[in-house]
């Protein structure tokens, strides 16, 4: 069994090709972006995007994490997590290979966003139900349902020029995301089981009374004091989580958004936040010969939606109304959009930060690969499920 160890510093010769290769890649990337946007606009967009992400995304996630952390602590204190684990274990174990308590993470992220599951994962009473190899997979299952309520309701509310209802398409897309979540989580668990083994607990120094016996740990004091202590402790966990994810969100998400988005609405670069060079949509167009048969898009323009969802689900669903209004997207497209926007939900910009928060940063690459496959399966499943539904 291969175990992860803390990173060690190693000595390398001063004279090597590494700094030259690094500078070539680093300068090449930014020279290509700068040649299209302009050097001043590129730097201005980077700083403005990072600042807006801090205000609009990180603080929002921190607020969600504080509330989710407080709710998680209350659920743990008064036995809700224990009850859910006992009731849903027969369902969650065969589907996901996770304890029933993981279903609480699904609900939390579905109603909010991907990192909300971290507030649960940082709660010792929640982690006791998990083995160490299962903990990193929470990133995959949480991301697969992140922003689910927002994405689904947004798609249901779209107005088709032909009067077509998108309720069934959105629900089929949600089912597709559910299938994708199983694929992503199972692939991740196969790898983490090789890394950690299947017996190591999440907290080696904790005797884990909830796993070992039928009892659970509670705080001392009156009912009121238990409520206040649980809420305050859970809220503090959320604040710490919000601070921990700042570097990952600002650095990774800024780069992803600049490679995903295009210029301003006027078609020119102004240095404003969220501008970019549209690399991912361009790549999607080049791969349309493969993507279109898999997902059944009515128009190749639909490829931009799942590609954009790699960086931001919110930005991705914002593209859908124009496609629907232009007749470039119909019910089947909406089903696929729902599945992939919900399953991927900006995972390239959150996975690394989430894995670092779980102290599993070395597995971030594996998590991204597993979730990429899961998102593709979600889109394919939604496509074929909608076609099957249309035949009925």
Image (cartoon, grey):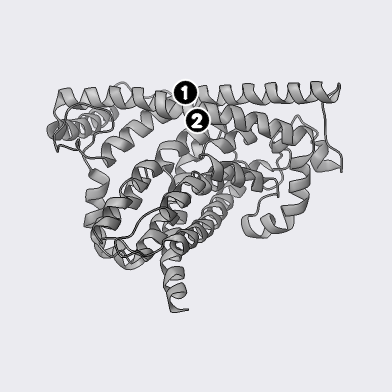
Quadrant hosting residue 254: top left
Q: As rendered, which of 319 and 7 lies closer to the eye?
A: 319
Q: Position of residue 12 (x, y in %)?
A: 37, 24
Q: Is residue 369 visible?
A: no
Residue 165 badge: none
Between discs 1 and 2, the one toward the N terminus: 1
Q: Is residue 117 above or below residue 331?
A: above
In what element is the residue under mark 1? loop
Q: Which residue is mark 1?
A: 9
Say few, some or many: other residues with alpha carbon within 10 Å of mark 1 (under 14 / 14 to 19 / 20 or more): few
- Mark 1–mark 2 Cα distance, whole angstroms, equals 33 Å
Q: Position of residue 383 (x, y in %)?
A: 41, 66
Q: Is residue 239 above or below residue 342?
A: above
Residue 61 badge: 2
Q: Position of residue 197 (x, y in %)?
A: 66, 46
Q: Is residue 392 above or below residue 220?
A: below
Seen at 15% across and 37% down, the residue is: 266
Quadrant hosting residue 104: top right
Seen at 55% across and 45% down, the residue is: 110
């Amino acid at each position: 069994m291969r175990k992860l160890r803390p990173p060690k510093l190693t000595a390398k010769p001063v004279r090597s090709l590494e700094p030259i290769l690094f500078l070539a890649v680093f300068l090449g990337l930014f020279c290509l972006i700068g040649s299209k946007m302009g050097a001043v606009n590129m730097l201005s967009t980077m700083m403005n995007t990072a600042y807006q992400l801090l205000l609009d995304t990180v603080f929002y996630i921190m607020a969600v994490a504080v509330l989710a952390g407080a709710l998680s602590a209350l659920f743990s204190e008064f036995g809700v997590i224990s009850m859910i684990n006992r009731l849903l274990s027969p369902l969650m174990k065969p589907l996901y290979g996770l304890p029933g308590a993981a279903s609480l993470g699904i609900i939390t992220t579905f109603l909010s966003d991907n990192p909300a599951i971290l507030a649960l994962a940082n709660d010792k009473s929640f982690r006791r139900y998990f083995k160490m190899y299962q903990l990193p997979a929470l990133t995959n299952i949480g991301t697969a349902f992140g922003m689910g309520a927002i994405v689904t309701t947004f798609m249901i509310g779209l107005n088709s020029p032909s009067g077509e209802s998108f309720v069934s398409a959105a629900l089929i897309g949600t089912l597709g995301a559910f299938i994708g979540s199983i694929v992503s989580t199972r692939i991740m668990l196969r790898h983490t089981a090789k890394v950690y083994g299947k017996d190591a607990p999440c907290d080696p120094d904790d005797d884990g009374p909830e796993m070992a016996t039928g009892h659970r740990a509670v705080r001392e004091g009156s009912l009121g004091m238990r409520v206040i202590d649980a809420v305050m402790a859970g809220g503090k966990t959320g604040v710490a989580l919000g601070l921990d994810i700042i570097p990952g969100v600002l650095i990774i998400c800024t780069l992803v958004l600049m490679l995903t988005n295009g210029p301003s609405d006027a078609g020119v670069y102004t240095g404003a936040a969220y501008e970019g060079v549209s690399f991912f949509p361009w790549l999607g167009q080049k791969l349309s010969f493969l993507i279109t048969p898999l997902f059944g898009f009515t128009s190749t323009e639909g490829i931009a939606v799942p590609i954009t969802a790699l960086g931001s689900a919110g930005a991705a669903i914002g593209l859908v109304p124009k496609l629907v209004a232009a007749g470039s997207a119909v019910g089947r497209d909406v089903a696929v959009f729902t599945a992939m926007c919900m399953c991927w939900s900006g995972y390239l910009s959150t996975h690394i930060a989430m894995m670092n928060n779980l102290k599993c940063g070395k597995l971030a690459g594996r998590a991204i690969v597993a979730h990429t496959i899961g998102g593709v399966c979600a889109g394919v499943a939604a496509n074929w499920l909608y076609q099957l539904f249309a035949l009925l």
